[in-house]
Structures are given as structure tokens and as C-alpha cells.
Image (cartoon, coloured by chain):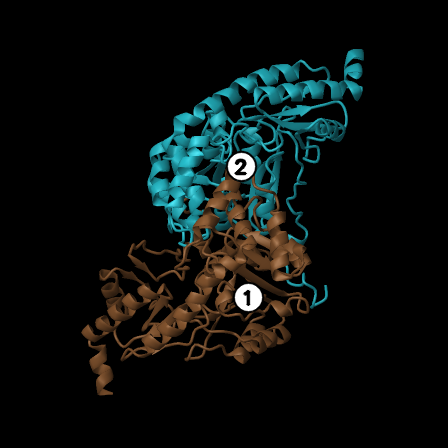
Chain colours: A cyan, B brown
Amino acid sequence: MKKNSPLYGVKPEVLKSPAYTLRAYEAEVKLNQNENPFDFPEDLKEETFRRYKERRWSVYPDFVPDSLRFSLAKFTGWHKDGVLVGNGSNELLQAALMVMVGKGSQVAIPYPTFTVYKLIANILGAKVVGIPLNPDMTYNVDELVSKANESRARVIVVNNPNNPTGSVLNKEGILQLLEKFSGFVLLDEAYYEFCGCSGFEFLERYPRLIITRTFSKAMGMAGLRVGYLLAHPDLATQISKAKLPYNVNQFSLTAAEVALENLERFQPAIQSILEERERLGKELNGIPGIRVYPTQANFFLVEIPVEPRTIFDDLYRHGILIRDVSSYPMLSKCLRISVGKREENDRLISALRTGLENAGAGAVHGTL
Amino acid sequence: MKKNSPLYGVKPEVLKSPAYTLRAYEAEVKLNQNENPFDFPEDLKEETFRRYKERRWSVYPDFVPDSLRFSLAKFTGWHKDGVLVGNGSNELLQAALMVMVGKGSQVAIPYPTFTVYKLIANILGAKVVGIPLNPDMTYNVDELVSKANESRARVIVVNNPNNPTGSVLNKEGILQLLEKFSGFVLLDEAYYEFCGCSGFEFLERYPRLIITRTFSKAMGMAGLRVGYLLAHPDLATQISKAKLPYNVNQFSLTAAEVALENLERFQPAIQSILEERERLGKELNGIPGIRVYPTQANFFLVEIPVEPRTIFDDLYRHGILIRDVSSYPMLSKCLRISVGKREENDRLISALRTGLENAGAGAVHGTL
């Protein structure tokens, strides 16, 4: 490479790393990003505006958002000094990985999973040890433990429930990881409100467990970027070194406080998503030719007998946006569908059924 | 270290790196963080609320904030594909360093300067080559170039104007760096609106120059965390790989757009700060025993003949908060004072004069 090239001096691991990109589509029915179909409540928006109006925008946010950390400590039951607040949980995952791994380190990551873990590890120069899920998308914990130990991985990252498969690592599985794997266990619990499963009860006993969660999904705040991390206070202190000062803007901090003070207001949306998940699962299962994987999150992974892109495009033409995950390993026949509102799910079901029929999937199924 | 310690596996460079901390003080007159003493205009706050109310908070921000990038491209006159938007310019500095340096790399940083550069470099495992400013706090460009080249630094980070000294690297100096140093030149222009000097004109010709700027200072948006980066589009693409997706929340993006559409509204505040800088500089110079360094930013570095902490504490008791920078290298006798509103500066001057007199500084000066 030429010395006056703009890329001369960029780390080779960065140059060969793909960028995380997502084409911006717009559609009436948006079931592509596992967002909450119910918006942040109107009156709580007003309350957030009212509080934020009184603050000077020209002044930096609190150096450490202590009042939010305090509320989160109370809410979760964890030590305040072990709670970190981030610009989305992604920032905290990045900070955690930054303090643990560097060039030459190994990071164990089951796959298929959320792409960002691998991207962060790559940029940091770490090597990713990928461990496949079972063909039915369940976790193979023995394999996880042995591969992670064998490669001397510094950390294993588990998304629980897992995006994009919906798979859950149950408590026995989490415990087995904590007992048998000798590195850090980083549990990304972005979807935990839809599952109820959590590694939380193990935090006190296993000081190398780190849990991240988010306000983006169940709390309807994806646009505001607020996440939190729970870990042993000594470890949290180290992780905070890789977190930039004033990393969360004061408006989002304000909204998060309003949300935590009004937790009960978010329950109806969660309840509705859980009921619709149940119903949507049954409806999807009733469509000929489709395979629906069990999920504990607010989305479904489905396998279809035709080219996923065809169906993605067809749905998009009908105003419905889902996620084509066919480029993920093991998922070449798959699509991911977020659970929406009842009427959105109805539109999806009907369009998907017709789309598959038109693509000949029903016929194929019928002849089997 | 014990295997079940929460710190076992944390990188040694992180363990030995200090955390960036700032004790939270509150005071009537806040001259400690180089914030804009004039808040974001009220009617533009309302306009931001109005626009953001119409958006769903539950939906992720734009994957790439194209409309803001477009506005910034227009505003700066740079290629849109070479503009990145970040959660404060710190995030962009971190992303830039992440793609350039790792364990064992060298980063050249003049000192004293903004602490965050060194913290980021340390966490990434890079070695910092510190190059002192001249005793009068001006840049020694020959020394910068030779030390940076000698150490084979991958990048040199220059804060221009420099925090906390106010020093400026003029155009000839920037050009000399670009011509003679063989690595990347990262210019942090956080305070450029108070200076007018910029490396911008060199971007087209020197594809390894990177400029970061912020909405935190002149635009009165420190609480909202918005910064931007200008670089060769190919380099910007690489840097964007280390930037997390959806890194800037939609509320702050909205506020930044409102600000750019109403640029003329921020001019009176900037003008007033510049006038007050002139006046405050003269007033400070008139206080016996004090040395005032020339500044092109919205703050002053002053050297005083007594223990800086004494004066810091004394001012704080009088409701005035400034920054004690005496722990910085070369600045053991120094304080940093942001330029406030006229009445704030008056209070500062009067309290500082009395404080120094009481501490005996005037007397010492009188005998010289």
C-alpha cells in the first residue's frame, strides 16, 4: 500500500473486517428490528420533555449517572457500584471486550448470533472461536465449554435469548458454563423481559459473570440508546475505564429515569407481545412448508422452502418489512420476524401465506 | 491473581490505567468544563421537542444519520461520505484510534493536553509518546515531528486549540506535521469556533488527516453528545467499522439538525464569548501575581504563585467552580477558567483577586 494512501496504517484486521451495514428500508409494518410495536407512552414522553426542559442543554451530563444507577440497583437488586449505564448495551459490550481482549486473544461465540460481538472482537484484533448451535438451534453446552476451554478463550459471549434464533440457555446451562469455563461469561440479556430467564442469581457467587441489558426492547426506547451492565463492582470499575466520559446524553438518562419510575406502565405492552407471540407462533406453524423455531424472545426464526429473498421482497412489496437472515451461518433458508401488534401480525401471516403459495412452497409441501 | 478473582483475565494495561474521574461539584457559577454559558435557545428546544414527539421512540435511530451527514457536508464543504457522526467527538476519536492502533503501537501526543487521548490509547494497549509543549505552552513543531517519527508513531493527536492550555498550532505548523510526519494526524478541533484556525483546507491534499469537531461547545449541546469527524471517505469507511451501530440517539440527532438549520442563532453567544475572552484576559492580567497564557479557546490557563487547590477551594466557597489542573504535567501551579457570561466573569475576577490577596500572593508580587 502506498504511503500516501488514506488506508496506510489502518490495522490489517480492520481492513479485512466487514462493516455492519443495514439498508434503510421503510414500510408500514416494521417487523425487522425486534423493536417494541408499542411506543413509549405519550404522557411519559411529555414528562420527559418537562423534566429535560428545565436542564441546561449546554451543560455536560452527570459524570456518572448516579441517580439512574441507584434506580437500577434498586430495580435489579444489585450493588450500585456494580451497575454501569451505557449508550445502548452495545457500548457496554464493547467496553467489556476492550478491557478483556486484544490482539491475539480468543473470544468464544456461539453461532448464529448477533453480529456485533464478532465485529467488536475483530476490530480489537481478537480471534473469534465460533461454536455452532445444534441443528435445532438449541445450545450444546458441553461443546461450548470444551471449545471455549480448549481455545483458552478469555471470554464467552452468549446472547440469551439468542438473536436471531430465539434459543435460550437455561439456568442449568448458564451454571455449567460458569462452573466449567475458566474465562469471563458475558451474558447479553437484551430480550430478557420476554423470557424471564436470567443469569442474575449467579452474579454474587460467580464474580466473572457480566450481564448486559437494554431499554431498547421491552421499554420501547431503541431510539434513545440506553443500556446497563451488571457485574462485580471491582470488575465494573475496570470496564468503566473503557467507557468514555459522559457517554449517555442527559435526555436519554431522563427518559430512562421516567421509565423506571413508571415500570408498571410497560407491562401491558410486554403482556400483549407475549400473547401475540403465542398466537403468531401457532399461526406460523399452520402455514404449509414453514418451520418455526421455538422462541423466548420477541421474534421468530422461520425456515422456508423457497429462497428467503423472494419472500422478503414479496412482503416488502406488501408494506411489511422483516429481516432476511439468510446470510448468517446455518440460516441460509431463514427469515426473522419480530412480533408486532395484533393487526400487524395478521397482515404478516396473510401475506406470508400467500407469498409462499405463490412461490410454490405450499405445492411442494402438499406433494410430500 | 486468583482464578476466581473478578479481575483475573482483565488486561494488565487496563488494570494499571487510571480511571478518568471528576468529582461532581455544584456551584452557581460553573466555569469548570468549558461549556457554553449561553444555553441552547429556548425556541429551538421547543422545535426539537416538537419534531421528536412525532417520532416513535421505540424505533432505532437511522442506521446512518444521512440527513445530518448531508447537512454537515453542506455546512463544512466536505464530501458527505467523509463525514461521520458520533456520540460526542470522543467516540469518534476512540473509533479512529481503534482502527489505527493496538497492542504495541505508538501514539504521539503533545502534553499537557486533554486526558482522554492517553486513556483511550492505554486501554488499546498502545504506548504513548508524550512530547512536551514549550515552557510558554506553545507548540514545538520540530520536536513533535522528530519525536513522532523517531518513535514510529502510527498517529499524532493534536488538540487545536489545546485544552487546557489554549495554545494553537497554526496553519504552518499543521502543514509541517502533514508534510514531515509519516503517520496519521488526528486534529481534535473541539474549540475551533472560538479560534477560526482549522486544518480543514488540508483535508483534500493530505488523505491521512482526520479532523473531529463537536456540538458540545459553541453550539451549546454538551448534554446531548454529538460530534463529527471529517476524513478521506475511504478512511472514514474504515473508522466507521469501529463505531457501534445506532451510536447517536435520535433526540440528539434531531437537536443537531435544528441547530444546523439555525446556525445564525448561535453567533451572538459565540460573539459574546469572544468579547468576554478579550475582557477577561485583560482583567486577569491585571491581577497581581498571576500569569495568563494566551488562548484561542473559550477558557484561560492561569499560573498563580500559591497552591492552586487553595484558590480552587476558596472560589468554590464563593459559589464559583473552576478546574484545578495542577495534577497535569507542567501545570503544577495552574488553574483553568472557562469564559462565562459577563456577570459570571465579574464574580470570578473579584473573588480571584481577593482570594490571591488573602493567600498572600499580592504581597509576594508586590515585593518583586
Q: Earlier in the sequence, mark 2 or mark 1?
A: 2
Of residues B332 and B90, which is closer to you in this image? B90
**Same chain letter for marks 2 and 1:** yes
Mark 1 neighbour class, 10 Å CA radius: few under 14, some 14 to 19, many 20 or more: many
Q: Mark 2: which amino acid?
A: Glu
- Say whether residue B338 is left or right of residue B61: left
Regarding residue A12, the answer to whether it shows in the image is: no
The residue labelled by disc 1 is B187
- Residue drawn at (42%, 46%) of the image: A250
**Numbered tag placed on residue B124 in the rendering:** none
Q: In this view, does B346 lie above or below B216?
A: below
- Residue drawn at (58%, 38%) of the image: A109
Mark 2 neighbour class, 10 Å CA radius: few under 14, some 14 to 19, many 20 or more: few
Q: Is residue A204 above or below residue A58?
A: above
Q: Mark 1 belongs to which subunit?
A: B
Where residue B289 appears, as percent x and y from the top left, is 28, 79
Q: In this view, does A255 lie above or below B201?
A: above
2 and 1 marks in contact (CB < 8 Å): no
Disc 2 vs disc 1: which is toward the camera?
Answer: 2
The quadrant of the image that shows the N terminus of chain A is bottom right
Of residues A323 and A41, which is closer to you in this image? A41
The mark total stands at 2
Q: In this view, does B347 lie above or below A203?
A: below
Where residue A18 appears, as percent x and y from the top left, is 67, 47
The residue labelled by disc 2 is B54
Q: In which quarter of the image is residue B355?
A: bottom left
Q: Is mark 2 on a helix, strand or loop?
A: loop
Q: Quadrant of residue A280?
A: top right
Q: Is mark 1 on a helix, strand or loop?
A: strand
- Residue drawn at (54%, 76%) of the image: B170
